[in-house]
Amino acid sequence: MRIRIAAATAAVALLAAGCGESCPTETPRLSQIANCTVRPGASVSYPIQLCPSCNQSGATCQVDIQGTTIQLDPTVEACTSSTGCPDNSCQNVPQLQCTFTAPMAEGTYTVFALDPVKGPQSRTLTVSATAPAPVSCSMVNV
């Protein structure tokens, strides 16, 4: 009887471990990144146009501000292999918004995002007290 209970408990534990797990994450290809102008301390939704493969979904963006450098780190979940699926994924993909608060100091900041094929891509964030509110951005191809 103890053996059956132990086996049943182990089976339930294995099933529970498989539920709700997330897929591995990876960096998606980029299609466009913006140059933006904002006011000091403004809430910024910095746009990035992704070009994910057909197996990538659930895009998120982390932001790291260090001095005059702003690192955007978009990630997606990759749940299955992209082998054998059509790669027309750059079409009709909504922009990802990387959200952060603009620095208080006026000036030009370098914004980096990594494209796994083309390498680091850089654009600019201009912080100016005379900037239009709330944010003015123009997209640039990667």
Image: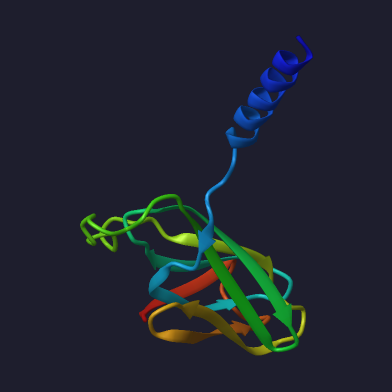
**Residue 46: percent from the left, percent from the top?**
54, 68
Residue 77 position in % (x across, y down): 49, 54
Toward the viewer: 10 or 50?
10
Q: Is residue 118 left or right of residue 38?
A: left
Please state the horizontal and vertical placement of residue 109, each as a whole percent of the image: 63, 87
State whether residue 35 appears in this view. Answer: no
> Where on the picture, by quarter, is residue 45?
bottom right
The residue closer to the viewer here, 19 or 70, is 19
Q: Residue furthest top?
A: 1
Looking at the picture, how far across and down is residue 5, in whole percent? Answer: 74, 15
Q: Quadrant of the C terminus?
A: bottom left
* Colour scheme of the picture: rainbow
Q: Is residue 76 left or right of residue 93?
A: right
Question: Does the rendering let one see residue 39?
Answer: yes
Vertical order, 116 against 120 (above or below): above
In this rendering, would 100 be left or right of 45? right
Q: Residue at x 71, y 78 (%)?
A: 65
Q: Nearer the viewer, residue 53 or 109?
A: 53
Residue at x 36% of width, y 53% of height? 55
